[in-house]
Amino acid sequence: MSTGNEFERESEVQIFSALLTPHRSLNRTGFLAVMLFLSVVSFVTGIAFLMMGAWPVFGFFGLDVLVIWWAFKVNFRTARASEEIVVTVSELRVRRISHRGHVAEWVFNPLWVKLDLEADEEFGIERVYLVSRGRRLSVGIFLGPDEKASFSKALLDALNAAKRGPTYNPVT
C-alpha cells in the first residue's frame, strides 16, 4: 500500500541521477590470469630452490601466492560499495551502501543545498561536500580529481535546475 507522498516521489522527474562505484581495473578474468601467472612463476622458482637443495624455501613460495590472492579478495569485496545521488525538484537524495551492505541515506531540500569544494593547486578537487542547514556530507568519495570536477559541475547544474523549479511545456 502506498501513500500519496510516495506516489508523488516516484512520479517526480529526476533532474540528475548518478550511481558512483569504486574503480576496479581488474575483472574476474584478469584476476584469474594474474593468479595463474603468479602461481606458475612461484612454482617454477620453488622447484629451482628444491633442486638446489633448499627444500624449506619451496613452501614459502606458496604463501606469497596465498597472500596476494587474499589481498585481491579484500579489494574485490570493497568494490561492492556504491553511492547513488538523485536530484528532483523537491529533494536531493544520497544513498550510500558500504562494502558490507550497510545502507545510509540522506535527504536534502535542493533549495537549501550548496556545493563546497576542497581543492589543491597541484592535485585538483579533493573533496566535494553538500552543505545544508549545518549538515555537511562528503559525496563522490570514489572519484578521482578530474571526475570530481565533472561530477560537481553536473551536480551544480542539477541543483540550479531544481531551484528554477519544474518546467512546463504547454501543448499547442
Image: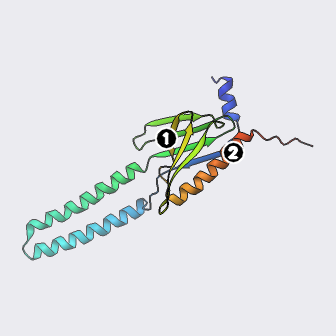
Q: Nearer the viewer, residue 156 or 2?
A: 156
Tell me the amino acid under the disc marked 1: Arg
> Do the residues bearing badges 2 and 1 touch, measured as CB atoms within 8 Å?
no
Q: Is residue 14 above or below residue 29?
A: above
The residue under label 2 is: 160
- Please indicate, yes or no, whether residue 47 appears anywhere in the rendered image: yes
Residue sticking out furthest to the front: 121
| In-front residue for pair 31/116 | 116
Camera-side residue of 77 and 156: 156
- Residue with the mark numbered 1: 96
Q: Residue at 54% x, 55% y: name it.
A: 148
Q: Earlier in the sequence, mark 2 or mark 1?
A: 1
At label 2, counting other C-alpha atoms closer than 10 Å, the crowd grade (few under 14, some 14-19, many 20 or more) is some
Q: Residues within 10 Å of mark 1 (few under 14, many from 20)?
A: many
Q: Residue furthest right?
A: 172
Vertically, is 171 above or below 70?
Answer: above
Q: Quadrant of residue 42?
A: bottom left
| Whole-percent x, y for residue 155 in the image | 62, 48
Helix, strand or loop at label 2? It is helix
Q: Secondary structure at mark 1?
A: strand
Residue 132 coordinates in the image, percent (x, y): 57, 36
Specify the amino acid type for callout 2: Asn
| Residue located at (67% from left, 26% from top) | 5
